[in-house]
Amino acid sequence: MKVLLIGTKGFIGQNLLKFLKKKHTVTGVNFDKFLSIDLNKLKSFDVIMNTSISKKYVYGKYSEKHDRDRLICNKIVN
């Protein structure tokens, strides 16, 4: 299975990357790199997982522009 893992700098992302690499083809990227990936390349992955988070999302009032899950979904769908 071909997996794209977003947010590989954090604790969960680093450990998930190590675990998944044992049995799958995994590409790890940070959120900014994900935004620059071409939509056709995204379609080549079987699974896209997100472990990234914005500190502005955690410590601030909710805002769509800091909701990374929403931004990722919008990129994949559109």
Image (tube, rainbow, N blue to C red):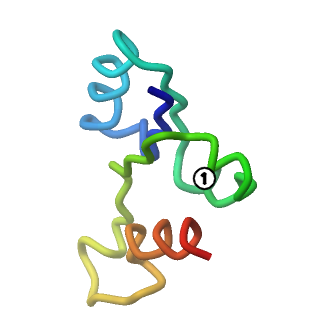
For the C terminus, give its image quadrant: bottom right
Up/down of 14 relative to 8, above or below: above
The one nearer the camera, 63 or 72, is 72
Q: Residue at x 55, y 65 (%)?
A: 76
Number of residue marks: 1
The percent coordinates of residue 23 (x first, y second) are 35, 12
Residue under label 1: 34
Q: Residue at x 41, y 75 (%)?
A: 70
Up/down of 23 relative to 76, above or below: above
The percent coordinates of residue 26 (x first, y second) are 48, 26
Q: Residue at x 33, y 36 (%)?
A: 13
Q: Residue at x 37, y 51 (%)?
A: 50
Displayed quadrant of residue 14: top left
The percent coordinates of residue 18 (x first, y second) are 34, 17
Q: Residue furthest top?
A: 22
Does dot 1 land on a helix, a strand or a loop? Answer: helix
Up/down of 33 relative to 56, above or below: above
Decide: few, some or many residues near mark 1? Use Cα within 10 Å; few <14, some 14-19, many ≥20.
Answer: some
Q: Is residue 40 left or right of residue 33?
A: right
The percent coordinates of residue 64 (x first, y second) are 41, 87
Q: Is residue 69 left or right of residue 4?
A: left
The one nearer the camera, 57 or 45, is 45
Displayed quadrant of residue 63: bottom left
For the N terminus, give its image quadrant: top left
Residue type beneath disc 1: Phe
Q: Is residue 14 left or right of residue 74?
A: left
Up/down of 45 relative to 38, above or below: above
